[in-house]
Image (cartoon, grey):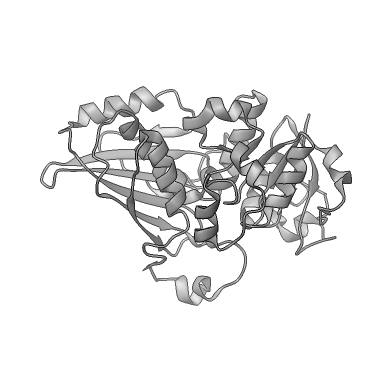
Amino acid sequence: MVKVGILGATGYAGAELTRLLTGHSAVQIKFLDSRSYNGKKYSSVYPNLYNEIDMHCNTADLNNLSWIDEIDILFCALPHGLSQKAVKIASSEGKRVIDLSADFRISNKGVYEQWYGVKHEAEEELKKSVYGLCEVHREDIKMGQIIANPGCYPTSILLPLYPLLKEDATSLQNIIIDSKSGVSGAGRNPSDSILFSQCNENVKAYSIASHRHIPEIEEQLSLMVEKEVIIQFTPHLIPMTRGILSTIYLENSKDLKSKDIEEIFNINYKNERFIRLLTEGDLPQTKAVTGTNYCDIAVKIDDRTGRIIIISAIDNLIKGAAGQAVQNMNIILGFDEGMGLNQMSQWP
């Protein structure tokens, strides 16, 4: 059995990670870290796991390494800025680390500090980290010690864009992305913007031209094509619990036809377990991927405007966070990537 520990186990991403790993046949959870619920039974915080997990939450002491010998892999589901010390400790002890925060996603320390307003104090570990977009960086992930689990918005954007950029099939100019996310993306900490009375029956744009995922998306797109890519990205908060729907607009500069795009996506993704390419007029919708590790993708060409329109849907807490983290673990350990991740969405 692979022994794992989870830092930040009572946030939404940490809770989904705990749920998924509880059902993973090759994993044993050794500790569930929480600063807010230290000493509480985990199922009293998340009653959906009653009789499934009997552990209590404990606060891991980052100044005492006794807990590190208990585990093979450390998952960090802490807010940005808080993972750095834990990652340094675990990696120095030879442990594999999968970090769900933003701390190791952006390779440029200065860019990270500019966008997140936090000093980066693990620069050597940052240099060694691997960006854990499973379907794109699988071979690097296999050998990586520190895996930077991608953000939820970036996952919903990078996966649908990758095939077209890899095949040089579209212009890099005027990439416009409109994304809509459920309120769980804001996390568990209460805030005015996610009060039920204010987000219910309401849709709003936020962080226009300033969302912290922009540098992560632009860096990864630029690496894909080996030249600078700048995007226009606007996120929206919508009144549902979970899910992201991203609509991406590209110039059809190569005059591609539908069959050309279908062939490009099939070449890159036809054997991918968790990418579903929708055809015959079907379009992604968040309910179809809720609770799953799927990314649904569809493409439409607008001949009138000369644009390619790509739509993707993911569950922000699964493929956009905990599910991708488990998939990264499976890749690292040589397991089947579907282990612990074969849940289907409920309908209706």
Residue 164 x %, y %: 31, 33
In-image side of 158 versus 326 (left or right): left
For residue 331, which quarter of the picture?
A: top right
How many numbered circles are shown? 0
Residue 284 x %, y %: 36, 44
Q: Nearer the viewer, residue 263 or 92?
A: 92
Is 25 above or below relative to 74? above
For residue 278, which quarter of the picture?
A: top left
Residue 296 in view (yes/no): no
Q: Nearer the viewer, residue 134 or 41?
A: 134
In-image side of 118 versus 215 (left or right): right
Is 37 above or below relative to 323? below
Which residue lies at the image location 46% right of the left edge and 44% below the top edge? 155
In-image side of 287 versus 76 (left or right): left
Is 325 above or below relative to 176? above
Which residue lies at the image location 64% right of the left edge and 28% below the top edge? 332
Residue 10 in view (yes/no): yes
Q: Nearer the viewer, residue 341 or 139?
A: 139
Residue 206 x %, y %: 40, 67
Image quadrant containing the N terminus:
top right
Quick one: which residue is furthest to the left in this view?
304
Residue 198 x %, y %: 46, 76
Which residue lies at the image location 25% right of the left edge and 32% below the top edge? 169
Which residue lies at the image location 29% right of the left edge and 33% below the top edge? 279
Q: Nearer the viewer, residue 104 or 179?
A: 104
In-image side of 228 versus 135 (left or right): left
Is 324 above or below relative to 166? below
